[in-house]
Image (cartoon, rainbow, N blue to C red):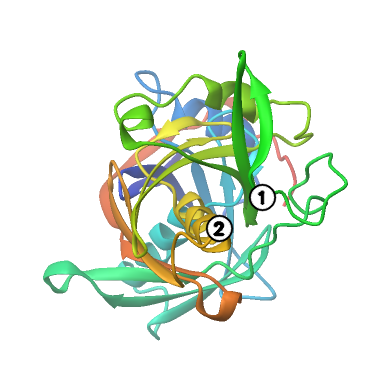
Amino acid sequence: MHIPFTKVEAIGNNFVLINALGLPAMNWPVLARRMSAPHFGAGSDGLLVLSESTTADFRLRMFNPDGTEDVCGNGMRCAAIYVHRKGLIAPEAVAFEANSGIVRAEIIAGAGGRPAARVNMGIPSMHPKDIPISLGLEQVVNYPIEVGGETYPVTCVLVGTPHAVIFADLHFFWDKIPHASALLEVHSLFPERISVTWCFVESGDSLVIRTWERGVGPTMGCGTGACAALVAANLRGLAGARACVRSPGGVLEIEWPDRGEIFAAGPANIVFEGEWPVAKDEETESGK
């Protein structure tokens, strides 16, 4: 058995997308681990699975390269461009059923007139029980956490998936993401692990970030990380309600009007298509 897949990317955050409409449920965690593997698989930052939904246009699931299920802003934008390019939606908007709830995206004009995608990532939460983080606080803002003999002030934000945002000079993280990221991801304060986003404030409307994603490691870009960075910068009075957020893979435009729903806009592309030979244990149904 062979299943078709599509390689997609958004600001260098790359995924394998499987259009599972009409396909039986498969062992998606195993497929995610194998297909995401560099050298031996298609190589990606995760697996996107597009399937039927009774509450939205489509259901979209995202699995990290270690097989854990998560939520991804760039993945949402990639899926929006995919269904648009494939003619699976008539209007210029699409609603996805995701683990974080219903996520709505729209197709907009990008650079050079190419289609881009803008996604509504919902209302961010800073409450420890949502992240979750084992602290009895109302918000975790600039909270000191010690790892590897160093102390880092973190601001924790949930934007579909949790992030610990750390403000630092650009030279500290741009060329090589700090090893502290891996230690913070699995810190005992975070029972479900956490992604770590390093942020440099160029100005009130320009941020530079790098993200270590839980279950993935360092990536070229991160949509939820860009959103979390703007929220953290805004809470500390370092940025306004909108900013261009630059990652190594490109730039996203993030808007957080009235501290309500947060929006991420930017390019996304189909890279290539292929077929994956399905092994017997990858056919095992793991649930819908």
The answer to whether the residue labelled 2 contacts the one labelled 1, judged by CB atoms less than 8 Å apart, is yes
Query: What residue occupies the far right of the structure in this picture?
Result: 136
Q: Is residue 186 visible?
A: yes
Percent position of residue 143, x then y: 68, 41
Chain-order first, disc 2 or disc 1: 1
Vertical comparison of 11 with 227: above or below: above
Query: What residue occupies the far bottom of the structure in this picture?
Result: 91
Q: Residues within 10 Å of mark 2 (few under 14, many from 20)?
A: few
Relative horizontal placement of residue 284, taking residue 16 as reference (left or right): right
Residue displayed at 50% across by 72% down: 256
Q: Between residue 287 and residue 120, name the one nearer to us.
A: 120
Residue displayed at 33% across by 36% down: 170
The tag on residue 141 is: 1
What element does badge 1 sit on? loop
Relative horizontal placement of residue 4, taking residue 154 as reference (left or right): left
Query: What residue occupies the far front of the structure in this picture?
Result: 237
Q: Residues within 10 Å of mark 1 (few under 14, many from 20)?
A: some
The tag on residue 239 is: none
Q: Which residue is mark 2?
A: 236
Task: Give the residue type that dot 1 points to.
Answer: Val
Percent position of residue 141, x then y: 66, 50
Query: What residue occupies the far top of the structure in this picture?
Result: 149
Task: Give the residue type that dot 2 points to.
Answer: Arg
Percent position of residue 147, x then y: 64, 20
What element does badge 2 sit on? loop
**Distance from the alpha carbon under mark 2 to that under mark 1:** 8 Å
